[in-house]
Image (cartoon, grey):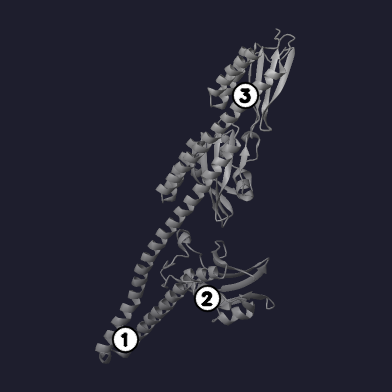
Amino acid sequence: MQMGTSSGSGQGEQLQAITDAALAHLELDVLLRTLVARICEILGIDSCTIAVHTADHDRVVSTGPQHDTVSTYVVPLELSGVLLGELRVAALVPHHFDAELLQLVADRAAMAIEHAQLFESERKARHRLECVQAVTDVALAHLELDELLQALLLRTRDTLGVDTCAALLLDPERDELVARAAVGIEEEVEQGVRIPVGGGFAGRIAANRRPVILPDVDHAHVLNPILHEKGIKSMMGVPLIVHDDVIGVIHVGTLKPHEFTRDDVELLQLVGERAALAIEKARVHQEMVRLDQMKLNFVAIASHELRTPATSVYGLLTTLRARGDELAPDVRAELEETAWYQSDRLRRLIEQLLDLSRLDARAIAVQPEPIVLERTLADLVTGDDVFVDVDPALAVVADPLVIERVVTNLIANARQHGRPPVHVSAEARDRHLRITVTDAGAGVPEQLVPRLFERFEHGGPNGGTGLGLAIAKAYANAHGGDLYYEPGPWGTRFDLLLPRS
């Protein structure tokens, strides 16, 4: 097939026909298919290929035979000095291509391609904005965390056109991600999947604080077996970050191999930003509801606890005042002893309530100072049923008031609910000080363990205010440490963990 140099009039008609085809389409893929077909038809050639360079990958559209061509000519697609791609034409027989005409064709094609890319970018931006707005609407519509997560995941799955979507929230105490909500992979939540930060797919996202794409899940390192069981082929996930703190991970997956693009990552990041803020808002709301309920419960229970000894003291004193001279000495002595016991209980309860009030208001200033721990603990012990086993040379920097409040409460708890002997020991390891109080009792009943440190939680029939352990834990927290119950064969054991500095 031969093509000679066209006349000016013929070139003009050819260029106009190609220009009309270019201006008729704004969608890039449709435009490229139309251009390659029209260029072959108008220029009378066998094959035409247009390759457009994009941020993610080249988009290549061809028409006509791609093999066994004899003559080939390539023209760059440039606009304002920027290379957009290339135009390649070919013929099955020796052929002379009109370089000038092809350059003019390439110029028209480049302009049309840029217009289509701008239209595509604007359409993607508008779609992204609509998706983010949809997620924002969901975030604003729910205050309950479980409802919020379910609605967010459904909207995210539909927005990205994927098969699965899941949210894992951080458990900071165990440094693990816990599956909290899922769509299409509900087994993650049902089986209580936990992923250590830094391990597996979700763990790497949380540890590195950036998106991760798994194009081939079958050959990737994942810790969650459910991903393989569900047949997920490709995945993408981003961290959920609020105030520069990672609070979780959101990830999506497909049941067929899928190539996630940069636009997909950016869209999921935008969704993740809105989701993280919504989750934090829901958590704050949840915490406020919980605190309000605790406050109501606290007032009701405190009133009840105060009323009991107060009523008892009032009744006993009324009896002694009205009939004291008539009572036998032993009866009068018993009533006076009971009145003293109940008034002492009332005094201790009021002191503990004031302690809790100051701790809640953060009105107690922790003042660490150098102390010899064995001497400090020995000064707290009275009676021959408590033994202190601490290295006399162990010196630490800690607040003696915090140690006194925690250890005395633990010893009182051991005496009241456990069985002697009571042992107090301590060790300094790494950057922490551990003080342990154990007794030879039967331990804490299993059903009580989840509520052990709650206020007004009584450990048994032996009385007590139910505030001792709650106060001890609050003091430990105020010092930057914590108080733990350790079940085991040794009886009842509590560990006070404090930072050494």
Q: Residue furthest top?
A: 1
**What residue is drawn where x is 37% and y is 80%?**
342
Determine the secondary structure under disc 2.
helix
Which residue is found at the position 63% from the left and 71% from the top? 426
Measured Cα–Cα span from mark 2 to mark 3: 84 Å
> Dot 1 surroundings within 10 Å: few (below 14), some, or many (20 or more)?
few
**Secondary structure type for disc 3:** helix
Q: Amino acid at mark 2?
A: Arg
Q: Nearer the viewer, mark 1 or mark 2?
A: 2
Quadrant of the image containing the N terminus = top right
Label pair 3/1, CB-CB below 8 angstroms = no
**Mark 3 or mark 1, which is nearer to you?**
3
State the image quarter where residue 22 is shown.
top right
Residue 119 in the image: state x and y as whole percent: 54, 32
Instruction: Looking at this view, name the residue that lies furthest to the front.
Output: 8
* Quadrant, the C terminus: bottom right
Q: Which residue is mark 1?
A: 331
Question: Where residue 405 is drawn, which disc sits there?
Answer: 2
Dots 2, 3 in contact, CB < 8 A? no
Q: Is residue 453 left or right of residue 400?
A: left
Q: Quadrant of residue 407?
A: bottom right
Give me the residue at 59% from left, 16% from top.
Answer: 38
Q: Count the marks.
A: 3
Q: Residues within 10 Å of mark 2 (few under 14, many from 20)?
A: some
Find residue 108 and name its label: 3
Q: CA distance from mark 3 to mark 1?
A: 114 Å
Asked whether residue 244 is in view, the answer is yes
Tell me where residue 481 appears, x and y as whole percent: 57, 67
Q: Is residue 261 above or below residue 496?
A: above
Q: Amino acid at mark 3?
A: Arg
